[in-house]
Image (cartoon, rainbow, N blue to C red):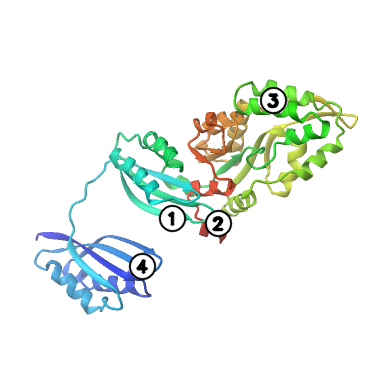
């Protein structure tokens, strides 16, 4: 017997029991070989749209569905129900990608530019989730891509022109698995540059700052720049390290990020071109167990101006991420790296998700995602975690 599909749409002010009434009506048709194929629902500020696709015998037609809805008295109190023949939709063959958009606020014009790019790529958006409204605005889109999609390449310049932070990642169960989240320290986890604070203590701040800026922009080799800067610290008393640590300021959202990662069972780590002597006690307080950083040479209670271990440069940062992933027991595709400087490029490139945090352009070019907002816990949105979940 021939069958046809119909779309049942229930809309109006949300109230308790609407879903139960709809499914009771549809279940009453099961004895007549009606089949429920698909269901979707969205509620925005108390306004409900609930859709169900139902297949019935052509001998019954839509009148049987309408009669079942009337029998359950769904309509009324502002609620309406419609039954229309379901028209075949255009099917996009390919995989799904998650597109995360983030800004201080997101306008219709900004979304329009993104959706035009998605359509131009031959892709379709299947679902939109509003992950956060404060302190930033964030949407996550589930996009069905065509087999030859270049969605990331298409969206990157569009998002930049629209003033949106963007991440494009593959969808899948890996997002619900345990992750290793590796962060740089200076200007990422911390608002400070530790070596600049040490330089203040020895009166060579201007000289050190110039070398730091050139290194972070990728203009000079990091290892050589670090040796030059540490050499300027020669003679500082060891007690200065405690004084500098007391001046450290966490980036806004850092504590929220770490607390949420711990509660989700994720593992945070820090891989830094800074110094173990400064960072280790602070990270112990924050319950961060994995740290890779440089070691200052100290003799007779004073800094010698040399390092006591191999330099943690950009290649060493990537190796540390790989080692931590092995120790934690997660594959590289379940690692996240967050950093701001050229020294973080290798680490960001090797991670499953590399995030440039308020970074130089050369770093953003190598990252999967970029954040220009000053809140480190915005990293959680790229993991699909909503503001409501964070606050809870």
Residue bearing mark 1: 130
Q: Are marks 1 and 3 in contact (CB under 8 Å)?
A: no
Q: Nearer the viewer, mark 2 or mark 3?
A: 3
Q: Residues within 10 Å of mark 3 (few under 14, many from 20)?
A: some
Tell me the element at label 3.
helix
**Residue drawn at the location 86% of the way across and 35% of the way down:** 238
Q: Nearer the viewer, mark 2 or mark 4?
A: 4
Q: Give me the C-alpha separation between circle 1 and circle 2.
A: 14 Å
Tell me the element at label 1.
strand
**Residue drawn at the location 71% of the way across and 29% of the way down:** 209
Drawn side of residue 319 relative to residue 11, left or right:
right
* Label number found at residue 150: none
Locate the N terminus and report the quarter of the image it occupies: bottom left
Q: Nearer the viewer, mark 1 or mark 3?
A: 3
Tell me the element at label 2.
helix
Q: Give me the C-alpha separation between circle 2 and circle 3.
A: 39 Å
Q: Give me the C-alpha separation between circle 1 and circle 3.
A: 42 Å
Q: Nearer the viewer, mark 1 or mark 2?
A: 1
Residue bearing mark 3: 211
**Residue drawn at the location 29% of the way across and 39% of the way down:** 120
């Amino acid at each position: 017997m021939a069958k046809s599909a119909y779309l049942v749409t229930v809309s109006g002010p949300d109230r308790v029991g609407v879903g139960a009434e709809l499914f009771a009506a549809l279940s009453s048709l099961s004895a007549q070989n009606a089949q429920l194929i698909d269901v979707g629902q969205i509620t925005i500020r108390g306004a409900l749209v609930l859709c169900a696709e139902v297949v019935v015998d052509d001998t019954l037609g839509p009148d049987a569905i309408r009669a079942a809805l009337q029998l359950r008295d769904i309509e009324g109190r502002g609620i309406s129900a419609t039954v229309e023949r379901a028209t075949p939709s255009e099917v996009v063959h390919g995989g799904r990608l998650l597109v995360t958009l983030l800004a201080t606020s997101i306008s219709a014009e900004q979304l329009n530019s993104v959706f035009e790019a998605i359509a131009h790529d031959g892709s379709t958006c299947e679902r939109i989730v509003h992950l956060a409204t404060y302190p930033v605005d964030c949407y996550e889109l589930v996009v069905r891509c065509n087999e030859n999609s270049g969605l990331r390449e298409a969206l990157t310049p569009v998002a930049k022109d629209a003033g949106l932070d963007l991440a494009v990642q593959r969808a899948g169960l890996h997002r619900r698995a345990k992750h290793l989240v590796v962060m740089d320290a200076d200007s990422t986890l911390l608002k400070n540059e530790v070596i600049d604070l040490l330089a203040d203590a020895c009166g060579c701040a201007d000289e050190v700052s110039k070398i730091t800026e050139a290194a972070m922009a990728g203009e000079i080799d990091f290892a050589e720049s670090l040796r030059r800067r540490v050499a300027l610290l020669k003679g500082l008393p060891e007690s200065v390290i405690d004084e500098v640590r007391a001046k450290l300021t966490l980036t806004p959202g850092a504590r929220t990020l770490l607390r949420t990662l711990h509660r989700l069972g994720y593992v945070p780590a820090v891989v830094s071109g800074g110094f173990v002597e400064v960072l280790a006690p602070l990270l112990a307080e924050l319950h961060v167990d994995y740290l890779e950083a440089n070691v200052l040479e100290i003799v007779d209670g004073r800094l010698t101006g040399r390092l006591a271990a191999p330099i943690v440069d950009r290649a060493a940062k990537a190796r540390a991420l790989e080692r931590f992933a092995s120790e934690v027991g997660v594959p590289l595709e379940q690692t996240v790296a967050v950093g701001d400087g050229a020294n973080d490029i290798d680490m960001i490139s090797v991670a499953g998700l590399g995030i440039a945090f308020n970074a130089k352009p050369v770093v953003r070019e190598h990252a999967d995602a970029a954040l220009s907002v000053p809140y480190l816990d915005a990293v959680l949105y790229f993991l699909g975690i909503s503001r409501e979940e964070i606050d809870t």
